Image (cartoon, rainbow, N blue to C red):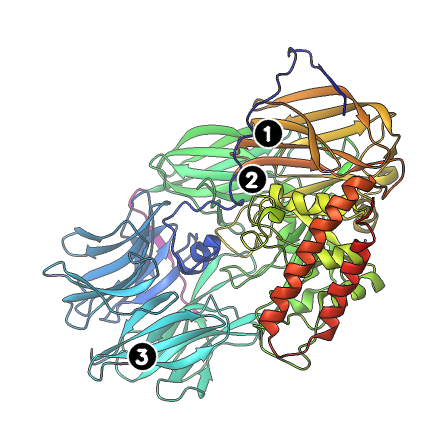
Amino acid sequence: MIIKPRCAHAASSALAVLLLVPSFAWAQWEHRYPKVNDYSHHIYLEQHEFPFLSSGPVDPAPAPDGKSLAFASQGWLWLLDLESNVAVQLTNGPAIDGRPRWSADGQQLAFVRDSGTETSIVIHNLEKGTEQVVNSPAIELDPEFSADGNLLYYTSARNGVLSIWRRDLVSGHDEQVTDLKRTERNARRLPGGDGLLYLNQAYPSRNIHLRDFVAGADTVIRRTGLSPAMSFDVHPVDRSIVLNRPVGDEYHVVVADMKDPVAERRLTPPGSYALMPAFGADGTDVYYVIPDANQQFRLMRVPTVGGSPKEVVIDDWRYADKAGELTITTADEDGESAPARISIRRADGHPIATMDGPTYLDPQNGYPYFYSAGKVTVPLPSGRYDVLVARGPLSMPVSSSTRVRAGKSGSLNLTVTRLWDARAAGYVSADQHVHLNGDGVYRMTLADSLPLLAGEDLDQLFPMSWNRLDRYVDEPLLGERIASPDGYSVHQSQEVRSNFHGHIGMIGSREAFHPWFYGPRMPRFGSPDRSNSEAIAFAEANNILPTYVHPISSPQDPFDDLAANPIPLELVADAVLSESVGIELVCMWTNPLGVAEVWYRLLNIGQRIVATSGTDMFTDFQRTPAAGTARLYAEAPDGRSDIDSILTQVRAGRSFLTMGPVLLFSVGNDAKPGDVTSPGEQSWELTLISTEPVDVVEIVVNGEVVEQLEGIEAGERKVYKGTISLPTGGWIAARVHGGTAGWPSMAIDQFAHSSPVWIGSAGSMDPEVAARAAAELISAVDFSAAKARKAYGETPVPRLEARFSAAREKLEALLQP
């Protein structure tokens, strides 16, 4: 093809073609902590197994004398006098301290210290004020003293997997105690000291094990389904345990007999989301915490024999440094009050939690963050603080440093400027794949997500109800839709998690598709002859947009090695046989360059496959990227911005998808994505805007990069123009990538891609290109068919086999150009 590039920009000279394409990260998650082998998704490790930051009391640990209770709050440890209800701050460092456990004599507390890049165990001597640290280059969690205080049990990943270890506190010698395949933590000694209980994550269950030191045996005494928020404690005298286990979307505190794997007594009322149960000193009471409607934590106490739970109110918080308060007011570029994302850290780096709504931790950049409607007041110990404010990925972050004085009220007035106002430009933004709840620390509703949208300048959100095998998380919310007066909308949809076959997001669903899961490695309920085509047919009949979510992890072309970089089992067959199927091009779990290679082949055979975008974050997780980190912008038709109108635009491909940058692309006589342009010599124009640097700008025709140009610097806006000779059929699009992202983004790399502009007619093809694509797609279908035969073995699956055969037949018709 003949290419004639030219560029129009007030402050730039001619563009140089880049000779080297920058490397792109394997996927959009990058772990800040040492990697462990028992978690393929590190975000689950950090959320479910690490301590967390709260403004209220969590991790209750009653003292052996029954007079006080240690707990974590605001990232520090506190000691609560149970008679006076006065809490005194014990630790005051830059890290997050949590999960305290007492020595039997009440002289020492062992706890987890999270620095933001590693965790360690700290033993704090209350009388002397000294600290002893147990640490390795790996993750350490969950300490527990032996009955005589000479040993410390704890979890460590120094051998690659989270296992229980034992340290001799006199000699300093460490010895591994357990050696199972997946996470072992939450160690608790038996009353007589002759054994240990601990949790083991043995997918698809979470089990409590008994390690009997006398008999040398290790047995499972209690088994639950997938329950990441579950923890337990051992009675100080009797062989009873208390645990919080899931019941539907709730978590309840129950007391159970160690020797009876079934019988239990529930202690919490209906509607509870109870976390972190712990027996009192004599075992007559159980302490636990619950998040309230404002996602603040309350300390509760209930008799072990049953009764009405009562809140343990803390009347006086005695900080190590006397407290003042800071009021932060945020405004937009016009000086009007504006919602914002706010991060506050003490000068030594200690993260600050809000008392109004959930507090989050950015797993990519390490910042704490929360949301404000435009004005928020935060009580703070006296000292200097660094404040960082943003509003979505197209706002320039604003930073400020201020001092809070004891007993005084301070204020900051900050203006957040956006580089591009999507609404003013006629676009609506949407994150089409998140989850409200996933056994995190909070309990979120659709209304709870609205402040997140406002603070991220995100118009629409599609949380998905999903399954944990024996539980359908957020099923009662499915189909609900809410909207705020200022134009933010949320629609609860569904994710069909048929793991082996590929996950399908049912965007815009109003009722559930059943079954929610199936496959050769799943529990069998009825006929095993299932196919994702059933979910797609259901979607087509109910005006739902079905899309394959988080499909490809690697930036490499999957067709180069289908075994090393697998495509979801039924994706190709379903996309070949149905144009209603979407593909999630941008997602925080996967890599858009690898996904694009599959999308391109499907476009090349004339399939008008819709590209979608979703962060796949959890609003109830603390350690999670912001909603809208991955998002889509669609043109608002005639000013209509309701969910149904925008979904119609998405189906028509009138959109671009992004991890941050704005990418506006047109061809010829202003043909935009979703439109049709003519073959032959055509002009093109591209506008690129980004808060962070972008390395590469590329024009793509029928899956081939035909022009590559230099990107832009942080905070820049640039217009590119050129001409190109287009073939008689196919499509043209633009994409940008490369450049390390940073706040306000929570992705690793920069990426954006326009939906295609079709050449000649929508769904047109270049016959030779289509033939090559069909051959590669046939290889993918055959690979999936062989994989299915091996996995299902002797189990007949004629429905699935027929799907592969039909796709192959359609593709074979395209092999002769």
Residue 341, numbered circle: 2
Q: Tell whether 148 sits left or right of 760.
A: left
Q: Distance between the residues labelled 3 and 2?
A: 45 Å
Residue at image point 60% right, 33% down: 737
Q: Tell whether 713 sits left or right of 658.
A: left
Q: Which numbered mark, 3 or 2, is in the foreground of this view?
A: 3
Q: Where is residue 512 in the image (x, y as percent from the top left)?
A: 73, 68
- Looking at the image, which is closer to me, 785 or 265? 785
Which residue is label 3 attached to? Answer: 210
Q: Tell whether 11 sits left or right of 208.
A: right
Task: Name the image quarter holding the C terminus.
Answer: top right
- Looking at the image, which is closer to me, 533 or 30? 533
| Magenta stretch bounds | 311-321
Q: Where is residue 653 in the image (x, y as percent from the top left)?
A: 80, 42
Q: Which of marks 2 and 1 is nearer the N terminus?
A: 2
Q: Is mark 1 on a helix, strand or loop?
A: loop
Which residue is label 1 attached to? Answer: 416
Q: Specify few, some or many for label 1: CA neighbours under 10 Å numbering under 14, 14-19, or 20 or more.
A: many
What secondary structure is the stretch in magenta mostly built from? Answer: loop
Q: Earlier in the sequence, mark 3 or mark 2?
A: 3
Q: Where is residue 371 in the image (x, y as percent from the top left)?
A: 56, 44
Q: Distance between the residues labelled 1 and 3?
A: 55 Å
